[in-house]
Amino acid sequence: MKKYNVAVVGVGAVGIEMLRCLKQRNFPLGELRVFARSSRNIEVDGQNYSVQAISPEGFAGIDIALFAGTEGEKGAAVTYASEAVKRGAVVIDNGVDFRMDPKVPLVVPEVNAKDVKKHKGIIANPNCSTIQLVVALWPIYKKAGIKRLVVTTLQASSGAGRGAVEQLKEEIVSLLSSWPVIQLYGQTGKRANGQTVLPQQIAFNVFPHIGGFGDFDYTTEEWKLVKETHKIMHDDKIKISATCVRVPVRTGHSESVYVETAKSLAPEKARKILSGGPGVIVIDDPKSNLYPMPCDVEGKDEVFVGRIRRDPFIKSGLWLWIVSDNLRKGAAVNAVQTAELLIR
Ligand SMILES: NC(=O)c1ccc[n+]([C@@H]2O[C@H](COP(=O)([O-])OP(=O)(O)OC[C@H]3O[C@@H](n4cnc5c(N)ncnc54)[C@H](OP(=O)(O)O)[C@@H]3O)[C@@H](O)[C@H]2O)c1
């Protein structure tokens, strides 16, 4: 079997999961190079990895570069993705920088696998909350069409990176000194200047603010959900409105989703369609306390759906509760699946 030289950029919350995924999914690896801002040795699940300081030359001979570094003007993707492409690699980037570029496919393999073929060197991975939303909605969209969505997300601290997970831990420890500590990444929840990673208290708190504020007073995270869903589903007529909320969960985003379908769809039918949907698992027996919860989906690769019920007042209105691990299907798994499509 042909083997591929792969680079992973970033060893934060997503980068570590990338390393896990490549191993767990038996990706046909030739050489694996791991880059971050500085060199060090790390251990993931008992395996040692030598991390090198990133440089353009480091991408020579790399076939696929999985980027999970920082975003923005001086971020890893903007600085190094073109350097990797110049040296012959295909880049799959987890950040926001290329997602809405019309030349860059935005791919969720269960929904728009064919878009991979349109790449010109860079493929973007959507935002974590978009991925789980479209995986769950796609089977419904194909069967009944979707006119409108109203979404509230409840997003875990790891969605803001490993520093935010450590901030949650440190806050919990200082608020409840007897709370058992989960050693996750050995990082601090404070930046070098002593500021916390997020300005708000995460522990024992929720706040409706992820990213910056933009048009119509919606946050950038809320706009990502709208625009990325339109791009992936190739349908910008779906009316989408969202509120994104940070919650004191370690990992696993939840979404309360109101779907107005084009053709009315009974909940039993929706349950059946979703049960056969690629990458979807239905857990929907609320009277027995069975519905998806972040603490149960952490470390899993599927998108879980429950609380499927109709709007008592509107025949074409359905409610869904969608939960997935933001670091796995919401980032690393989706990127590695896309790499698998590429080599296929
Ligand atoms: N967390 C999620 O749920 C999630 C989901 C979907 C997408 N994403 C996206 O995935 C990316 C990574 O997120 P994360 O949560 O893993 O962040 P993170 O935990 O903060 O880790 C960031 C990693 O990127 C490295 N890095 C930063 N700047 C770099 C540069 N200029 N060159 C090379 N490496 C650099 C850091 O290196 P050092 O270790 O040397 O500091 C660190 O290892 C972001 O674009 C994020 O938006 C995250």
Image: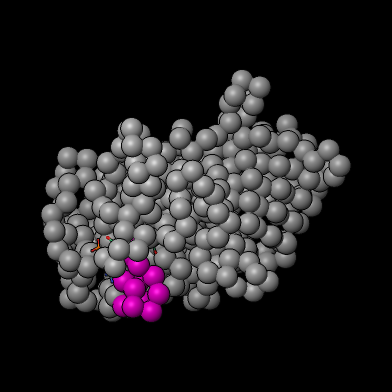
Residue at screen point 48% across, 54% down: 128
Residue ID at (21%, 64%): 35
Q: Quadrant of residue 159?
A: bottom left
Residue 71 counted in the magenta span: yes
Task: Place residue 228 in its image quadrant.
Answer: bottom right
Q: Position of residue 310 (x, y in %)?
A: 77, 38
Check the image and report above or below for 317 versus 71: above
Q: Is residue 284 magenta?
A: no
* Closest to the observer, 236 or 220: 220
Does 280 appear above or below 240? Answer: above
Q: Which quarter of the picture shows residue 84?
A: bottom left
Residue sitting at x 62%, y 29%: 284
Q: Going by the image, does 13 lie left or right of 271?
A: left
Q: How is the image coloured?
A: one colour
Looking at the image, can residue 279 be seen? Answer: no
Rendering coords of residue 59 (x, y %): 21, 71
Residue shown at 64% from the left, 74% from the top: 215
Is 249 in front, or is 26?
249
Left or right of 96 on screen, residue 215? right
Q: Is residue 35 left or right of residue 248?
A: left
Q: Quadrant of the C terminus?
A: bottom left
Q: What range of the chain is rendered magenta?
A: 68-79
